[in-house]
Image (tube, grey):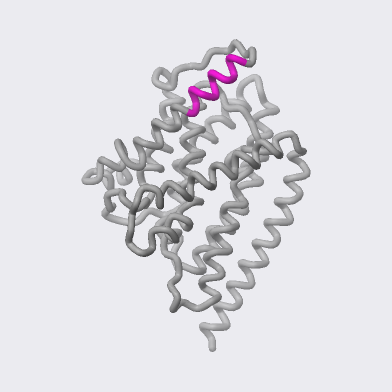
Amino acid sequence: MTITELLSFLGLAWSRLLLFPGGVCLLIAVWLAEVFEQRRMLHGFVSLPTSWLTSPRATSAVALPWLGVALLPLPGAVALSRPIDLAVLIALLEWPRLLAIAADLQGGDRWRGVQRLAAALNGYPPLILAALLASMGTGTLEVAGLLRIPDNGAPLQQTAWFWLGAGALILALPPLLEIGPFALDAPDDLRPGMRLRKLGIILIAALPGIASLTRDGTDDWWRIALPPLALGGSLWVLHRSTRHQSARRWAQIYLGYDLLLLLALLTAGLLALQARLA
């Protein structure tokens, strides 16, 4: 799937890109980047940011996650002609992080590049395992599957796997978002793209919560906004309380967490195989 194909899906749904959810999240990301930059300047740092409008690298760091956010299946957004795989959205959202890793490793802050790469390696395994667990409950790896909560008539195991995957995805967010013990600063020109990336990932993790509040067919704005706002607030509290802790210790915790998720996924696969052979 190419960028041209993705843009073609937005041909009759341009409001996704310019208004909701893409344009709204882009404005929020730029505002957050400006707020953090002003705070950094007030604390005595004198380096000035490079405008993302004049840097080709930074422009792509904003454009691709902006496209990823615009493709999210949020309630109230214009319907697309076809569903989008979760892997495609994650790839679009992760582009600024890849640019940041490359910039750090090739520039003067290689240690930060190594730390950012280590955070990615701690975040991707639980992300993949959580997505697979959720797919056991929905039967699909499309991002819209996170909105398909198994109904009351679904088997108990199917519902359990879905919510276990949804919860596991939330627990994978600290290394994915580079917060708490994994907190890292971003290059100045990539900061808006990194903020937009974080907003997109939080929205993906909040999709099951949004689905639970809108499953009766009501798309009130607060039902859509409450889960990501609550999740973002909880992550901020986690960041403030754990940012001075050892990243190595948390990496060891995530290694055990990955093993537990893998065991749960193998159990789900065995139970599904037994049910099919019965």
**Is residue 40 covered in magenta?**
yes
Q: Is residue 238 above or below residue 79?
A: above
Task: Name the foreground residue: 201 vs 208.
Answer: 208
Q: Position of residue 178 (x, y in %)?
A: 61, 38
Q: Is residue 98 above or below residue 166?
A: above
Task: Name the foreground residue: 131 vs 233.
Answer: 233
Residue 256 shown left or right of residue 178 in the figure: right
Q: Residue at coordinates 47% horizontally, 31% vertically from top-left?
A: 193
Task: Name the foreground residue: 203 vs 106.
Answer: 203
Q: Quadrant of residue 116?
A: top right
Q: Position of residue 233 (x, y in %)?
A: 56, 42
Rendered-image quadrant of the C terminus:
bottom right
* Secondary structure mainly formed by the magenta segment: helix
Q: Position of residue 155 (x, y in %)?
A: 50, 78
**Is residue 202 covered in magenta?**
no
Q: Residue at coordinates 57% horizontally, 20% vertically from top-left?
A: 39
Residue 214 shown left or right of residue 94 in the figure: left
Q: Residue at coordinates 48% horizontally, 40% vertically from top-left?
A: 199
Q: Position of residue 235 (x, y in %)?
A: 59, 43
Q: Residue at coordinates 63% horizontally, 69% vertically from top-left?
A: 266
Res 108 visible: yes
Q: Which residues are magenta?
A: 32-42
Q: Is residue 111 above or below residue 82?
A: above
